[in-house]
Image (cartoon, grey):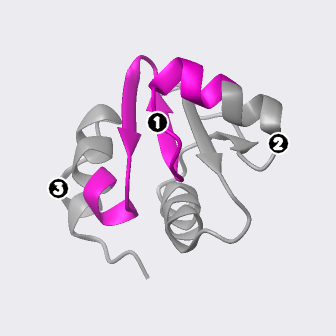
Amino acid sequence: MNNTSHPQVIVYTTPTCPDCRLLKDWLAREAIAFEERDLTDPEIMAQAKARTGVRVAPITLVQDQVFYGTFASQKPGLVHALGLGPAAADKSAQ
């Protein structure tokens, strides 16, 4: 699914990361298309570190903006970067 009304989103994740799952679930509920990249692949990890300077999951790229840390810490910035309204910010992460 490609929603052209939102900027390109890339999410660097790991399979066992709870915040990664929360982030991906929230993006899906908001109908935001995203490309997922697996940080357990050494080449992907190197690419993420070179591009963002961090080695944590999840890392979210919205065009040239970088968000990392817990989903709760990323969410306010993502709402703004994605142009979502206040209702998206208030939605529960569960």
The residue at the point 77 percent across, 50 percent down is 40
Sequence-wise first label, 1 or 3: 1
Which residue position is annotated with label 2? 41
- The crowd level at tag 2 (other Cα within 10 Å; few <14, some 14-19, many 20+) is few
Tell me the crowding category of disc 1: few under 14, some 14 to 19, or many 20 or more residues within 10 angstroms, Cα based: some
Q: Secondary structure at mark 2?
A: loop
Gap between marks 1 and 3 measured at Cα: 29 Å
Tell me how far mark 3 sits from mark 2, CA to CA.
Answer: 36 Å
Looking at marks 1 and 2 on the same chain, the residue that comes earlier in the sequence is marked by 2
Which of pointers 3 and 2 indicates the residue nearer the eye? 2
Q: Position of residue 32 (x, y in %)?
A: 53, 45
Look at 56% across and 66% down and name the residue there. 25
Q: In the image, is 90 to the left or to the right of 14?
A: left
Which residue corresponds to mark 3?
Answer: 86
Q: Report the magenta residues as a range.
A: 47-74
Q: Is residue 4 left or right of residue 83?
A: right
Instruction: Measuring from the top left, give residue 91's x and y in whole percent.
Output: 30, 71
Residue 52 falls within the magenta-colored stretch: yes
The answer to whether the residue labelled 1 contacts the one labelled 2, judged by CB atoms less than 8 Å apart, is no
Q: Quadrant of the C terminus?
A: bottom left
Q: What residue type is disc 1 on?
A: Val
Q: Secondary structure at mark 3?
A: helix
Question: Could you say where residue 34 lies in the image, as x and y percent from the top left?
Answer: 62, 40
- Relative to 9, 46 lies left or right: right
**Which of 30 and 78 lies nearest the eye of the viewer?**
78
Magenta region includes residue 7: no
